[in-house]
Amino acid sequence: MFLCLVLFSLSLVSCKKNIEVFYEEAKEYEVYVVEDKTNKVECLALSYPVTSAESIFSLYTTYQNHIPLGYNSPASPNITLLDCQVKDKEIFFKVDNYIFLSDISLFYDVLSKTCKLYGYEEIHIIFNDSELI
């Protein structure tokens, strides 16, 4: 009995298992946000995927929770993007009336600067077929 216990213990010690661990570093994307204390526009790196004009707009509205503490978006999270058209490196964001719950000029500033980082030259915020800024 004792011999069986010793052999069993030795067999457990000699067991080897290879465990492979894979990880992928989160890709970071640069965006402009507003610093809470100074109310200045600053560039930050976030893991929120910036893949299109719509994703940039969504960061400032629907997905504001991706912006770290100490920074904020000047846009109301209730703004609905009704349409987004890209023509020759210009973006036309058609929005609903919730845009007026935002600091429109500051929102335009961060949105424009972030869009320029990703190759767009100009942006237009459209409400009821007229350009706001």
Image: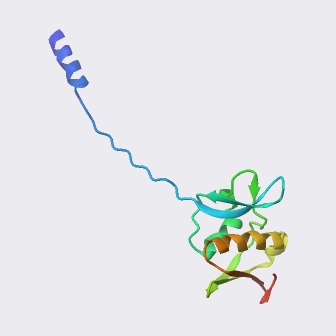
User: Which residue lies at the image location 69% right of the left edge and 77% below the top edge?
Assistant: 81
Q: Position of residue 101 (x, y in %)?
A: 84, 70
| Spot occupied by residue 132 in the image (x, y as percentages of width and height) | 82, 82
Is there any visible trace of residue 20 in the rendered image? yes
Q: Is residue 128 above or below residue 99?
A: below
* Towards the viewer: 30 or 61: 30
Colouring of the image: rainbow
Q: Is residue 1 visible?
A: no
Q: Residue at x 63, y 63 (%)?
A: 30
Quarter where residue 45 is shown: bottom right
Residue 32, by quadrant, is bottom right
Residue 12 to residue 79: above or below:
above
Q: Is residue 1 left or right of residue 49?
A: left
Pick the quarter of the image with the N terminus: top left
Q: Quadrant of the C terminus?
A: bottom right
Q: Nearer the viewer, residue 115 or 92?
A: 115
Q: At 81% across and 69% down in the image, what residue appears?
A: 106
Residue 13 sits in quarter: top left
Work out which residue is located at the far bottom of the displayed protein and give it: 129
Left or right? Give the position of 62 relative to 36.
left
State the image coordinates of residue 2 (x, y, percent, origin top left): 18, 9
Q: Residue at x 25, y 32 (%)?
A: 16
Numbered marks: total: 0
